[in-house]
Amino acid sequence: MTGSAARRPVIAGLGITEMGKVYGRSAARFAADAVRLAVADAGLDLSDVDGLLTNSGTTGEVGVDLQSQLQLQDLRLLSEIQAFGASAGAMVSHASLAIQAGMADVVVCVFADAPLREGEGSAAAYSGRRPPTGFTGMIPAAGLTSVNAMYALAARRHMETYGTTSEQLGAIAVAQRAWAAMNPLAQLREPITIADHQASRWIAEPLHLLDCCLVSNGGIAVVVTSADRAAQLRQPPVHVLGFAQAHVGYPNARDGRFGLVSGAAQAGPAALKMAGLDISDVDVAELYDCYTYTALLTLEDYGFCAKGEGGPFAASGALAPGGSLAVNTGGGQLSSYYMWGMTPLSEAIIQARGHGGPRQAPRNDVVLVSGNGGLLSHHATLVLSPHPHS
């Protein structure tokens, strides 16, 4: 990354609220709490913040009016960013550019959501959405009535093309649960086996319950500032070495790449190039895992394994604690908590700081973070490190 070394961006604060089945708070309340926690974690005051980037989940309650709720004054940067699960990476990218350009000195990026309602199941969190109209109405008319069904279609295409099996997807769920067992913040910590995965009920075939992410209430915020400012702050700085986005725009037509290639194939190499690194330099990968299949596809598209080899790679045990690649070391969205792109980003910061405790990866010089949004439509990649750019 070019620019003055003093103005190079770092992540200096991380705020994580209570997570999971936490009721009685709005998404806006979670967002405000997360911002306060992140600012305090950095050793700053709210009055130091001159930039705020927000992203809201299913409830849509977190926007630019968060400035008023926090009583932030004289902001130099304020915006709401929406690329769904790729939004966290996009926010850090925009904040980093703002820091480099001198547009702001302390930028907070925040995501919060509160879809769970007491006494109702997780499925209710995503019910009641406005039905599609016009040509887009043909998709649910064909039976694809949910995000689960669309990702099941993508997973099935990968299976038919490359021979990927349900048991191989299950290996990802099992590995991430093993990581989650060492994470006190994780919602699900009980170990599981491939047999447990196979016995879990179908959600949308070929996806079992244990192929699908959690639903969580909570909020996460990060503080992005300059390297010179961070040197005086409370936490070890996490340097933002590279970032990139990719918005693939799949056509709703046959012979497209849907299900076979994600935006990681573009955003990954671009972010690594900015960082002056290669995929072989990556020590830790925190991947967006709304489904086991999504993590598998991202592993292939980043180049951790060849296209079509994600299944055997996962089944080899490479992703579990003690394996050759530390992946989703907090348990990911499958077992830890579901905060869109803030889930992999928050764990990446913990790993880069060396604060992972019993789940700390043996090497953390380069941490790769992915965000996936929509139906494999949007992607963001960050390259983080405890060390400044060489």
Image (tube, grey):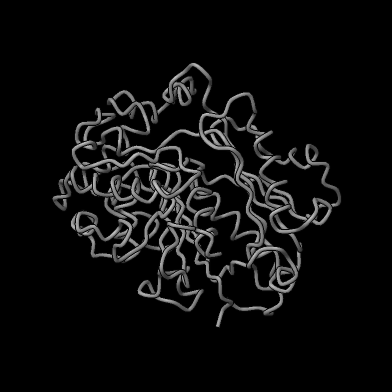
Give above or below for 109 relative to 25. Answer: below
Report which quarter residue 67 is drawn in. top right
Q: How many marks?
A: 0
Q: Residue furthest top?
A: 119
Q: Residue furthest front?
A: 358
Give above or below for 291 relative to 117. Answer: below
- Identify which residue is drawn at 38% across, 42% down: 334
Q: Position of residue 303 (x, y in %)?
A: 31, 66
Horizontal relation, residue 358 to residue 55: left or right: left
Report which quarter residue 195 is drawn in. top left
- Identify which residue is drawn at 54% across, 49% down: 87
The quadrant of the image that shows the C terminus is bottom right
Question: Looking at this view, is 162 or 309 the one in front?
Answer: 309
Q: Position of residue 79 (x, y in %)?
A: 69, 48
The quadrant of the image that shows the N terminus is bottom right
- Identify which residue is drawn at 27% across, 26% down: 142
Q: Residue furthest bottom?
A: 390
Q: Position of residue 179 (x, y in %)?
A: 38, 51
Question: Looking at this view, is 320 or 154 the one in front?
Answer: 320
Horizontal relation, residue 352 to residue 237: left or right: left
- Identify which residue is drawn at 51% across, 74% down: 274
Question: Looking at this view, is 248 or 159 the one in front?
Answer: 159
Give above or below for 87 relative to 69. Answer: below
